[in-house]
Amino acid sequence: MEAFLIESIGIIAGTLGVIAWLPQLREVWIEGLHEGISLPTFWLVSTALVLWLIYGMLIRSISIIVANVAALACILSLIIGVIRLRKEKSD
């Protein structure tokens, strides 16, 4: 039961972490806003998430794996959206 409780806390934390990216995703993909977004920062965050994902795999923590895959998907979607918007603006 203790392991389940620990993983549940991790899943809740990961879910909240992903939900935190939703407003930014909305601004980029729906509103088309990209000003003020630092791509180097987002690449650094992506690198950190990949390392956390590897760590989660090494310790076999489903909550760390799921949370980091989901967060990485959000960040990569943001990066793609910002690059797309900036390319359109420069054309």
Image: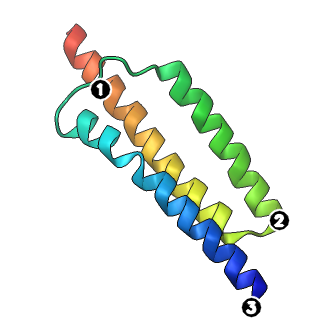
Please tell me whether residue 51 is drawn above or below residue 91 in the rendered image: below
Q: What residue type is disc 1 on?
A: Arg
Q: CA distance from mark 1 to mark 3?
A: 46 Å
Crowd band around label 2 with a 10 angstrom C-alpha radius: few (<14), some (14–19), many (20+): few
Counting residues from the start of the chain, the first of labels 2 and 3 encountered is 3
Q: Is residue 52 left or right of residue 87?
A: right
Measured from the top left, where is residue 82 in percent x and y? 34, 26
Q: CA distance from mark 2 to mark 3?
A: 18 Å
Return the residue at label 1.
84
Q: Where is the C terminus found, in terms of image quarters?
A: top left
Extreme-right residue of the structure: 59
Return the residue at label 2.
59
Crowd band around label 3 with a 10 angstrom C-alpha radius: few (<14), some (14–19), many (20+): few
Please tell me whether residue 81 is drawn above or below residue 13 in the rendered image: above
Please tell me whether residue 62 is drawn above or below residue 50 in the rendered image: below
Q: Is residue 84 left or right of residue 38?
A: left
